[in-house]
C-alpha cells in the first residue's frame, strides 16, 4: 500500500501516518518528492482497512499494491483450473469447448425433454433450464420450483446431459444439488454474499454470472467468497453489462475473456443470449466469443420461442442452433481449440 | 400495448399477429400508416408476456402502454404514503424531515451507544447501524451479527431512537424484527427477490435502497414485490448510482426524488454518504437533497472515523453532523418543510 | 510518478526501468516490498509520456502523483476566480448568484425580445439563446446563424442583459464576440480541442459545458486548454451526464459542484434544464443546485414551449420561471448566498 | 408517430392534440383503450419536431415510428455499400477484409516509413498515422501537422499503401485530402457537426469513429450528416465505449457489428487497439472482431512502443502484428471471408 500525502501536508501529519502504520505492524518507507511526500507501507494489506489511513489529516490518496483477491488470482495458482463436471465433460483451457444449451425456464416435462433431445442432437454437452426464476416483475412467471427440478432430472435421465440450473435461495440448495451438476448463481445475485458463502460449502461446481452493473474485479471478489469457503470449482460467466447502448439488451463485454484469463486461473464461459437479448444477434456474438478464447458457451434454445414463458426473443430455434453449432466448430478449429 | 410492424411486413404476418392477440383475449385496433402498420392491443397487458408477440415474424417493436408496476404507482394511490415508525416519528410528504444517522457498522456496545447519544443530541430522529454487513471482500469485517442486534437494542433503550438496520438473509429476519423499527434492504440485494418477498410478509416498515446499477423503474418493480406480498410501508432510498464519473464513489442521482414522487406515492429518503463516499462532500449534497424534496436523510456519523471498521472515509464526526443539522434546518425551512 | 513492478519482475527489468527514468532526468527511489518492488520517479511528470514506462517489461502499473492539469487547479491558484461579465454582473463564489435564462434557440426577433423582457422582469441577470445549434439530426433546425446574432444584439440593447451564446465553429468567432458577453462551448464540443484553443485566444469569458460522456477530470483538462492559451475567464457548467437511468434525459451530477470547487478555483454554473430534460423536474433540481453551492444557473425559458424549434419539453414558461425565482431567492438566502 | 395520452387526459386535451396534428398536415387515427387513449399520426415524422406535441397538456409520451435517419438506413438502400479506396483496396461486405495498420502518430519520416514497410510486409492493406492529434491534455504531443502529412505522402510513395489520417479542423481539409485516401473523423469529433458537414462535401471516403459516450443510433445520425451533404462513402468504426468496467481502457462493443449491419448498409471497421487499450488484449479481440463479421480492422503497430509519442501501451510490435495476421487469416477463412 502506498500513501500519497497532500502537497501541503505538514511534518506532523506525515509522522502521524507513519506512527499509525507502525502500530498496525507495517514497515514504513518514506520518499519525499518535489511536490509531495509518498509513504510506502510494507506488509500484508489484507490485514488492514486502508480506509482508516485514508481519513487521516494530510492524506491525499491510497494506492493498493496487493490485489484484493487471493485464491482466485493467477499469482496464487498459475495453472488453469479445469473443472470436471462428469465423466465426459470438463470445463477449462485445454479442454473441449463446453456447450451449455437449453431454455431459459423449465416450463413442463415435455418441453424440457424435447429441447434436451434437440440440443443434444445438435452437439450440446450440457443442458440449462431454470426451475427458480429471478424476474424483475412479481407478476412474471417465477418458475416451477421443485416440480421443475424433477423435470430436469427426467431430462438428464433421458439424454445423459449434465444439468446447469440456478439457485436463488440457500434454503433450496439441498433439493437443487440432487439434480444439478453445476449450480448457477444468477447475475442479480452476484453480490448476494449469503448465497455465495452457501455455495462455497457444497461440492458441486458453480457457474457465477457477472452482475449487469458489476466490474470484473467485483466478479472476482464474489468468486473469492466461494473459494474461501472451500469450493474451488467456480466458472465465471460473462453475460453482458449495462451500458449507455440501447440497441442491445446488454453489452457483451468480450474483453472480459482475455482480462479474466490474465488475472485468474478460473474458466470463463460466455452467455451471448443474455449479452445481446435478441436471437438474430446471437450467432455472430457466439462466434466472436469462441474467437476471443472462451472456455464455454451458454446459449438459450427453445422449440417455440413465441410460447416461451421467459426470454423467447433471445432464444434460438433448434434449427438455428444446429446451424450455429457447425460454425462454432469451424471457428474453434481455426484457433486450435478442440470440440 | 402497441405492436409496430416492419415496413415490409406481409398481410399474412399482420393477420398472424392479430389472430394471436385475439386468442389471448385482446381487442385489436389496426392502423395502416404510410411506412408501416401499427397494431393496438386493447386489454390488460399484465396478462401477457409481450415477448411472445415480439418474436412473431414481421414484428419490429412492442411499445407497452401500461406501466409494469401497479401497487406502487401514483395512479393506483394518488395520495402520498406516510409511514408511521413510532409515536413520534413518521416518514412521508407533509411530515417533518426524517433524519436517520449513525455508524455504518455496529462495532461494540460502547461505540453504538456513544454515537446514538451524539446524533440524538444533534437532532437525529432515528439511529442507523449494521449488524449484518454485505462487503465486497470476504476478508472485510462482516458485522457482529446477533451480538450487534443486542447492542442496537441497548442503544434504543438508552436514547429512545427508533432503529434502522439491514437484513441480508431471510433466516435472520425473526431476530432482526425484534429490534428494528425499519428493516433495510441494502443496495446489493435490491433484486434479491427471495428476500423482497420475505420482507413483504412482515409488519415493520422497509427501507429499500436502490441498486448502484439499477434504474428508478427497476427500483419501483422491486418495491412492487414487497407491496404485492402485503407490506405497504416501503420507503425508497436513493444512495448513488454507478456512472462514468470517478471523482465520487457513486453519482447521487437527486433527480430520482422528483421522478419517484411523480411516479409513486411512496416516501423517498436520500443517503448522501454512500452517494458521494467522502465526508467532505456530504454537507453540500445533504442540503441539495433537502432542497430537491427528500422526505428523509440517512447519514453516516462516527465518533472515530479513523478507527471505523467500515466506511470511515464517508462518515461525519458528531461535530460536523451537528453543524450540518443547523444548515439542514435552514434549507428545510426555506422550502416550507417542517423539522 | 510511482512505478509498481510485477511480483515476478526480474532484477534486470527493474534496472532497465530505473535506467530509463534516469536518462529522462528523474530522480529514482527504490522500495522493495514483500510482494513487489515499487519505484518512485521524482521530477515533473508533465515532462514525460508515462506510457513509455508503462510498456517496459516487468512493469505492472503506473500511478501518477501530480495532477494532469495545472492552471485550473486550486493548488496553482488557491483563491476563487471571479469573472466580471459587465458592470453589474460577475460570476463566482462570494458574488450574487448568476441567473442566465432564455430560450434554447433564437427563433425570431420578436421571440427573443419577448423572452428577454420576461426573464429580466422575473430577475434573470443574463440572457441565453443559441444562433448556432448543434443538433443530433441534420434534419432538425440548425439555428438562424448570423441573423440570430443580430436578434440577440437587439435583445441586449432592449433589456441591457448580457448575452450568452454558443460557438460551434472557430470561423464564426469574430461575429459572435461582437454580440456575446460570454461565449458558450457546448457539451458535444467539450473535446473539440481546435475550438478550445481558439476561445483561449479571445478576451471574452467562456462557459464550458461538460460533455455528457465526460468525467470532471476531462472537463478540467478541456478548461486547461483554454487557460493555457491565455484566457483565464472560464466558468464550468454541469449539465447532466449519460448514465443507466432513463427516467430523465441525463443525470444531473450535482456532486460535481463540491468536487470541482475542491479541485479548481473556477466558478461552477449548473444547467438543470438539460440535466433533467423535462420542465416539471426543473424546479426541484434548480433549488438543489443552489443548495449544493452553484455560482450560477442557466435555465431554459420559452413563452410558447409547444412552438419552440428546440427543447420545448424542458423549457419553463415565464410564469413558472417567475415562481421559481422566488424560491431560488429563499434557498439562496438560507445558505447565506447573496442574490 | 404515436401519441400516448395520460390516463386522465380530458376529451378537450385529446381534441387539442388531434387539431394540432391536423394543422401540421398529419392524418390522425384515434384508438381508445381501457386505460388510455392512443393517437396515431400518419405522415412523415421528419416534417415535425415531435417535441411540440410532447409538451401539450394530457400527453404522456411520444413513440416515433419512423427512424430518425434515412440515407444510412438499410431500408433506404438494401444492398451493402462497398467503398473503393484504390485500385486494389475496397471496404465492404463481400470484399476482402481491410487491414489498416500503423502508428497512432506520425513521429518522423523514418518512423512512418519503417512502420509502413513492416505492416505492408505482414499483410496490411492500408497505413494509418495521425498528423493532427486530439489529446486530452494540452501538454501532450499534438502531432506534426503539415510536416506529418508530408511524411505520410512519402510512406505512401514508398509502399503503395493507401493512407488513413484524421482531420480535426475543417481548415486543414484541403491539405489532408491531398495525401489521405480515407479521412478519419475521430471519436471525440463524432458530434462535431460543423466538421461532419465539411467532410460531407469532399470526394474521399470517410472513416467515422464512434464517440466513447455515444450510442449506435447517434453514430448513424452523425453518418447521416455526411451522407446528406453528398458523400456516400462512409465507413463506421467501433472503437470501444465508456462503461463501468475499468479493467480495459474502453469496452469494445462488438455487438455493434451485427446491429449496424442490420440497421445500415455502410461497412463496419473495428479498432481493437483503442477498444482495449493494452496490446496484450488486442489479439483475442481482433480475432473476435473478425468472427463477429467486421469488414475491416484498424490496428496500432509501432516499432518502438516504449518510445512512441502516443498510445505506446496499446501498440503491437511488427513481430506480434505478423503473428496476429496469420491468425486473422485462419479465423477469416473459417467464416468464409476472403483475405
Image (cartoon, coloured by chain):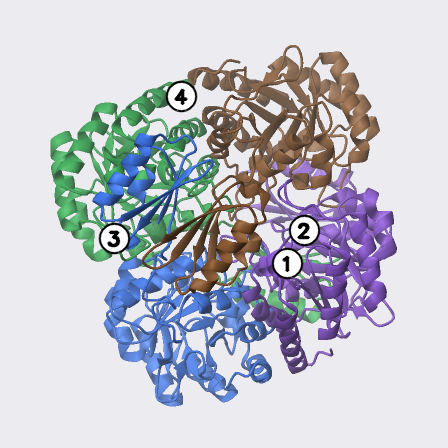
Chain colours: A brown, B purple, C blue, D green
Same-chain check, marks 4 and 1 = no
Q: Nearer the viewer, mark 3 or mark 4?
A: 3
- The answer to whether residue C303 is left or right of residue D150 is right
Q: Which residue is at a point 17% across and 52% down the rendered structure image?
A: D174
Cα distance between the residues tagged 2 and 3: 44 Å
Q: Nearer the viewer, residue A77 or B113?
A: B113
Horizontal side, residue A131 vs residue A231: left or right: right
Above or below: residue B83 compared with residue A305: below
Q: Is residue D100 above or below residue D201?
A: above
- Please name the residue shown 32% across and 37% down the image: C55
Q: Earlier in the sequence, mark 1 or mark 2?
A: 2
Q: CA distance from mark 1 to mark 2?
A: 8 Å
Q: Which residue is mark 3?
A: C47
Say which of B95 and B106 sits in front: B106
Question: Which mark is on residue B187?
Answer: 2
Q: Taking the image as drawn, is residue C49 in sight?
A: no
**Which residue in the protein does label 1 denote?**
B239
Between disc 2 and disc 4, the foreground one is: 2
* Inter-mark Cα distance, 4 to 1: 46 Å
Question: For residue D127, which quarter of the picture?
Answer: top left
Q: Where residue A33 sits: x, y (%)?
A: 34, 55
Q: Are marks 1 and 2 in contact (CB under 8 Å)?
A: yes
Mark 1 and mark 2 on one chain:
yes
As measured in the structure, the alpha-carbon distance from the residue carrying label 3 to the one carrying label 4 is 43 Å
Disc 4 target residue: D331
Mark 2 crowd level (few <14, some 14–19, many ≥20, 10 Å Cα): many
Q: Secondary structure at mark 4?
A: helix
Amino acid at each position: 500500500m502506498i500513501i500519497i500525502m497532500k502537497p501541503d501536508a505538514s511534518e506532523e501529519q506525515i509522522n502521524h501516518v507513519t506512527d499509525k502504520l507502525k502500530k498496525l505492524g507495517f514497515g514504513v518507507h518514506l520518499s519525499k518528492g518535489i511536490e509531495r511526500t509518498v509513504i510506502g507501507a510494507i506488509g500484508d494489506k489484507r490485514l488492514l482497512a486502508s480506509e482508516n489511513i485514508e481519513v487521516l489529516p494530510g492524506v491525499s490518496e491510497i494506492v493498493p499494491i496487493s490485489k484484493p483477491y487471493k485464491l482466485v488470482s493467477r499469482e496464487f495458482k498459475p495453472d488453469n483450473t479445469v473443472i470436471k463436471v462428469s465423466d465426459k465433460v470438463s470445463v477449462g483451457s485445454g479442454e473441449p469447448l463446453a456447450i451449455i444449451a437449453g431454455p431459459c425456464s423449465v416450463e413442463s416435462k415435455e418441453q424440457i425433454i424435447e429441447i434436451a433431445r434437440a440440443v443434444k442432437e445438435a452437439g450440446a454437452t450440457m443442458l440449462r433450464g431454470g426451475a427458480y426464476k429471478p424476474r424483475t416483475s412479481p407478476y412474471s412467471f417465477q418458475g416451477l420450483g421443485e416440480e421443475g427440478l424433477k423435470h430436469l432430472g427426467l431430462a438428464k435421465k433421458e439424454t445423459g446431459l449434465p444439468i446447469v440450473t440456478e439457485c436463488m435461495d440457500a434454503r433450496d440448495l439441498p433439493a437443487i444439488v440432487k439434480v444439478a451438476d453445476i449450480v448457477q448463481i444468477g447475475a442479480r445475485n452476484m453480490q448476494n454474499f449469503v448465497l455465495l458463502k452457501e455455495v462455497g460449502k457444497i461440492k458441486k461446481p458453480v457457474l457465477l454470472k457477472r452482475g449487469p452493473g458489476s466490474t470484473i474485479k467485483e466478479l472476482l471478489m464474489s468468486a473469492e467468497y466461494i473459494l474461501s469457503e472451500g469450493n474451488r470449482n467456480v466458472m465465471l460467466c460473462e453475460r453482458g453489462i449495462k451500458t449507455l447502448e440501447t440497441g442491445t439488451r446488454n453489452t457483451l463485454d468480450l474483453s472480459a475473456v482475455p482480462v479474466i484469463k490474465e488475472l485468474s486461473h478460473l474458466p470463463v464461459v460466455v452467455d451471448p443470449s443474455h449479452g445481446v437479448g435478441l436471437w438474430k444477434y446471437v450467432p455472430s456474438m457466439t462466434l466472436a466469443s469462441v474467437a476471443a478464447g472462451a472456455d464455454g458457451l451458454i446459449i438459450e434454445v427453445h422449440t417455440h420461442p413465441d410460447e416461451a414463458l421467459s426470454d423467447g426473443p433471445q432464444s434460438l430455434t433448434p434449427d438455428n442452433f444446429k446451424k450455429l453449432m457447425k460454425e462454432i466448430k469451424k471457428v474453434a478449429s481455426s484457433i486450435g481449440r478442440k470440440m
